[in-house]
Image (cartoon, rainbow, N blue to C red):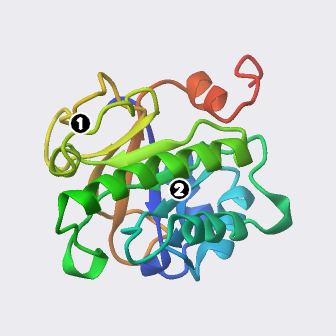
Amino acid sequence: MSGIQGIDVSKWQGTVDWSEVASSGCRYGIARAAYGSTIDTSFSQNWSGIAAAGMYRGAYQFYRNPANVSVSDQISAFKSAFGSAGYGTGELPPAIDVESNSTNDDPLTTQAEIDTYVAGIQTWLDSIEQWSGYVPMIYTTASYWSQLGNPAGFGGYPLWVANYGVATPTLPEGWTTYTFWQYSDTGTVPGVTGSCDQDVFNGNQAQLKALTKQDATVA
């Protein structure tokens, strides 16, 4: 598979040995910062560990139905996860995880709820872009985006697409390419106990570095 390998994690992976992850060939790690308005209990450890291993790092928020968890509370949790340091230059763009309406993740039962849910995505993107200085990424699947009615106006945001067991990912309507592809949720990677999500960056080393707002011409 062409592209640059990495993984994404949350508290469910427990303690990760990021030096082993880096030694396995992964160049970046993306850690869950918050689930709705709750900061991930492993985030601080993952955030510092990724950097200590010499890898690029990014963070995401699992976005929940605003009918149950307000968008403002979700934004506050994401920002609070970074403390006074904020989201500095040298990181991968922050991401909003738009993926599930299962029973545990606040099902969307009416069109009005879907409309509010989609509007909240834009509110999160606008707020986090202003705060971080990065254009955020959207993590989703083609099937879930379709369940939301394939909302327009989001195709300009970098896409982190999830699609497993295929040679090429199916993209949600509105996008013509992807930035990251989560191609497995059952990967085995040294340094991680059990399975984890595996990702590939759709580009070369210079392009990955440029995504972090660093000078891509410098090795």
Q: Residue at x 78, y 47 (%)?
A: 88
**Extreme front residue here?**
112
Would you say 33 lies left or right of 5 here? Answer: right
Q: Looking at the picture, which amino acid does disc 2 mark?
A: Ile
Would you say 49 lies left or right of 73 here? Answer: right
Q: Looking at the picture, which amino acid does disc 1 mark?
A: Pro
Residues packed near mark 2 inside 10 Å, few (<14), some (14 to 19) or many (20 plus): many
Q: Residue at x 31, y 32 (%)?
A: 152
First in residue order: circle 1 vs circle 2? 2
Label 1–label 2 contact, CB within 8 A: no
Where disc 2 sits, the SS reads strand
Find disc 2 in the rendering and name its residue. Answer: 30
At which x and y percent is residue 57?
A: 62, 51
* 132 to 42, vertically: above or below: above
At which x and y percent is residue 183?
A: 27, 48
At which x and y percent is residue 26?
A: 50, 49
* 11 to 21, vertically: above or below: below
Where disc 1 sits, the SS reads loop
User: In terms of depth relative to the viewer, which is nearer, 6 or 120?
Assistant: 120
Q: Quadrant of the C terminus?
A: top right
**Extreme top residue here?**
217
Residue 86 visible in the snapshot = yes
* 67 to 143, vertically: above or below: below
* 52 to 92, vertically: above or below: below
Q: Residue at x 18, y 64 (%)?
A: 110
Would you say 195 lies left or right of 138 here? Answer: left
Q: Quadrant of the N terminus?
A: top left
The label on residue 172 is 1
